[in-house]
Image (cartoon, grey):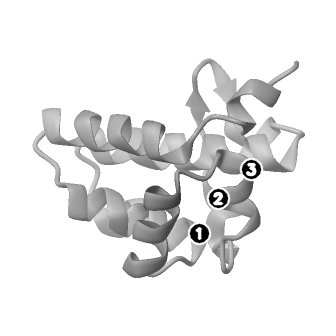
């Protein structure tokens, strides 16, 4: 599966879509930020900088301070793919993030999202 086009996609573009998805389901931008910061180790200032610099997904994850050690507990299907079975490490991180945003939009409690 050739996913390099996703790796080159600006994170800021997808971030806006994450926020829109959450807000449509009565969740907040702050909750989206909390989920992203939990997964990546960015603080709010670091996340804001990544968005302002319009870094691509590859750079966004390469510069992430620390992927949360519990990220391996993220399981399930997103975009028809089991996130725990994704072989490419970068694609798996992207799918982890997609899955967390899906859980947020579906109304899951934050304590359960942030394993």
Q: Are marks 3 and 1 in contact (CB under 8 Å)?
A: no
Query: Does the image show residue 115?
Result: no
The answer to whether marks 2 and 3 mark residues whose Cβ atoms lie closer than 8 Å is yes
Asked if the residue under mark 1 is in contact with the one under mark 2, i.e. CB atoms within 8 Å, the reply is yes
Q: Residue at x 63, y 34 (%)?
A: 9
Q: Please determine whether, in this image, residue 15 is positioned above or below residue 3.
A: below
- Image quarter (top left, top right, bottom left or bottom right) of the N terminus: top right
Position in image of residue 11 (x %, y %): 54, 46
Nearer to us of marks 2 and 1 is 2
* Residue 68 numbered tag: none
Is the residue 61 above or below the residue 2 in the image? below
The residue shown at (31%, 48%) is 104
Q: SS class of the residue under badge 3?
A: helix
Q: Secondary structure at mark 2?
A: helix
Q: Which residue was labeled with disc 2?
A: 60
Which residue matches tag 1?
40
Q: Position of residue 46 (x, y in %)?
A: 49, 77
Farthest residue, direction left = 26
Find residue 58 and name its label.
Answer: 3
């Amino acid at each position: 599966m050739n996913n390099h086009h996703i790796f080159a996609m600006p994170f800021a573009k997808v971030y806006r879509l994450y926020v829109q998805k959450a807000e449509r389901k009565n969740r907040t931008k702050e909750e989206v930020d909390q989920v992203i910061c939990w997964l990546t180790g960015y603080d709010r200032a670091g996340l804001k900088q990544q968005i302002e610099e319009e870094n691509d997904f590859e750079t966004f994850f390469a510069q992430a301070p620390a992927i949360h050690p519990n990220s391996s507990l993220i399981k399930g299907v997103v975009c028809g793919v089991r996130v725990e079975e994704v072989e490419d490490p970068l694609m798996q991180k992207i799918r982890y993030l997609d899955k967390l945003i899906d859980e947020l939009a579906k109304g899951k409690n934050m304590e359960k999202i942030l394993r």
